[in-house]
Amino acid sequence: MRQRALIVTDKSDRVFNFHHNTLHALQEIVQAAGLRHPADLRAHHIVRRVSSYEVRLMSDLLKYLEPNDLIDGNYRYTLYEKYWPVARSDSFAPDLEAVTA
């Protein structure tokens, strides 16, 4: 039903405009931060509103690990402590046997 309603020429124009506007917004962000390239953009360049009266740097909100933390069992954060032991290299599905072990 959706496929029959799709007008390819109309959709392609809208996709083009969306992509063009997204790149323009990225350019404005990079320039406002005083950077030369989007690859130079880091979490401390972005501010996120966390409530109606508070904003925080993304670098304060993101959870960073040191190299080899997960391999060495230094999870640092509850999120990694919960999910890393059931992670699998061959699938996105959790290793349920690791949960019961």
Image (tube, grey):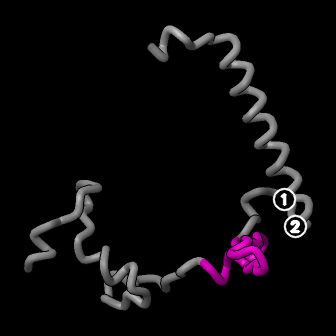
* Type of amino acid under label 1: Val
**Which dot marks residue 51?**
none
Classify mark 2: residues with Cα within 10 Å, few (<14), some (14-19) or many (20+).
some
- How far across and how far down the image is residue 38, in percent? 76, 57
Vertical order, 14 against 69 (above or below): above
Numbered disc 1: secondary structure: helix
Residue marked by disc 2? 33
| Residue occupying image coordinates x 24% and y 57% | 93
Count numbered badges in the picture.
2
Helix, strand or loop for disc 2: loop
48 lies above or below 5: below
Q: Is residue 98 magenta?
A: no
Give the CA separation, mark 1 to mark 2: 5 Å
Is residue 79 depicted above or below 86 in this figure?
below
The x and y percentages for residue 60 are 66, 83
Q: Is 94 situated left or right of 60 in this image?
A: left
Q: Quadrant of the C terminus?
A: bottom left
The image quadrant of residue 91 is: bottom left
Q: What stretch of residues is rendered in magenta? A: 43-61
* Residue at the limit of the structure toward the front, as seen here: 52
Name the residue beneath numbered marker 1: 30
Residue 33 position in % (x across, y down): 87, 67
At label 2, the amino acid type is Ala
Residue located at (48% from left, 13% from top): 3
